[in-house]
Image (tube, rainbow, N blue to C red):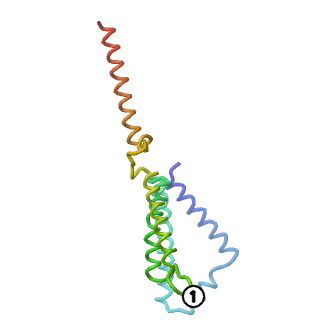
Amino acid sequence: MNPFLILTFQGIIGFIFTIICSYYENPIPHLKNVYNNNSTGMFTLFIFLLLFYTIFGALKNIYRMVTIMLFTPMYKHLADIIINPIYIIYSFSIGDDFINDGNPDYFYFFSNIILLIIFDICGLIFNEFLILNCCSLEYDTYQSISERSLELNNYSEDDSTNKSNETIN
């Protein structure tokens, strides 16, 4: 089934639920209150921003769908964990985090940074962005498996060519 068709059905069902909920709790008195308490320009801006919010919500859902279609969850997780050290450094630099008794806790900060860098390196190895050519760690990588399958294909083609040459002779 087409994922964009699923998003369309989700939007239609959400619209139907919104209409049902609006009959249960009528939004028109609240909307009249916003209209009466604000100028016409502010009310127009309010309606425009509601429309803008709806459009951006749809674009966010399309972005999620395309991301899921293009990338595996492990690649998306890798992008998330690589950003974590940047968040921690930013948080520490503006003084929002790693505070103990009013003073910055450097040990806690550096231990977190070191652990996050180790996690990032392990994630890069797991997703085969980094391939370690020691201790046979490269054996089960995509590249190594592809090379072995090509060698096996070439071997079977050579073997079938030799057998066909033997039958001709």
SS at badge 1:
helix
Residue furthest toward the right? 24
Residue furthest toward the top? 169
Residue 55 can be seen in this image:
no
Tell me residue 55's x, y (percent). 47, 70
Residue neighbourhood size for the residue with mark 1, other residues' Cα within 10 Å, grouped as few (<14), some (14–19), many (≥20): some
Residue 63 can be seen in this image:
yes
Task: Tell which of 91 and 57 is nearer to you.
Answer: 91
Tell me residue 93's x, y (percent). 43, 80
Q: Quadrant of residue 150?
A: top left
Residue hosting label 1: 34
Position of the C terminus by quadrant: top left
Task: Tell which of 131 and 57 is nearer to you.
Answer: 131
Amino acid type, residue under disc 1 in the picture: Val
Residue located 62% across and 82% down the image: 28
Tell me residue 163's x, y (percent). 35, 13
Relative vertical location of residue 120 with respect to residue 52 in this rendering, above or below:
above
Tell me residue 61's x, y (percent). 50, 63
- Count the labels in the image: 1
Task: Tell which of 79 and 86 is nearer to you.
Answer: 86
Relative vertical location of residue 62 with respect to residue 103 in this rendering, above or below:
above
Residue located 62% across and 65% down the image: 16
